[in-house]
Amino acid sequence: MQVHITGRHVEITDGIREHIYDKVERTLIDFPRVEDVRVILEIQKLQSIAEVLVQGKEVHVEGKSESENMYTSIDQALEKAERRLHKLREKVQAHH
């Protein structure tokens, strides 16, 4: 699984980078079809925005979150993406 981190109007520090890698590994370890994770971080005025794009074999899920703290935005966006992946997996398994 590859993780790409992009910053718009924000510098990606080592702390943020490590936080993202740790959270992605813990959160998405249950999904073997995930091949690529893109995390886009952005700051607009006082809001920190994190967008997570998860792509893989027949999988495309997005999660986006806004808050005043960048770490909180990252965590919430990853949780949204994880919920959508669970929902997608349940939908696929229900048809079999």
Image (cartoon, grey):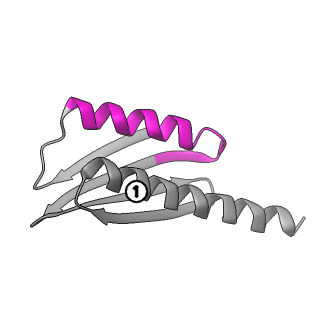
Q: Residues within 10 Å of mark 1 (few under 14, many from 20)?
A: many
Q: Is residue 64 visible?
A: yes
Amino acid type assigned to the residue bearing label 1 in the image: Val
Question: What residue occupies the far front of the structure in this picture?
Answer: 68
For image coordinates 57% across by 55% down, the residue present is 82
Q: Main secondary structure of the magenta part?
A: helix
Q: Could you tell whether 47 is left or right of 64 in the image?
A: left
State the residue position of label 1: 52
Q: Position of residue 78 (x, y in %)?
A: 46, 53
**In the depicted structure, whether residue 76 falls above or below residue 15:** below
Q: Specify the quadrant of the image occupied by residue 21.
A: top left
Q: Secondary structure at mark 1?
A: strand
Q: Position of residue 70 (x, y in %)?
A: 25, 51
The quadrant of the picture occupied by the C terminus is bottom right
Membership of 91 in magenta stretch: no
Magenta-colored span: 14-36
Q: Position of residue 2 (x, y in %)?
A: 44, 38
Q: Could you tell whether 12 is left or right of 2 in the image?
A: left
Q: Is residue 1 visible?
A: no
For image coordinates 64% across by 47% down, the residue present is 33
Q: Position of residue 26 (x, y in %)?
A: 54, 36
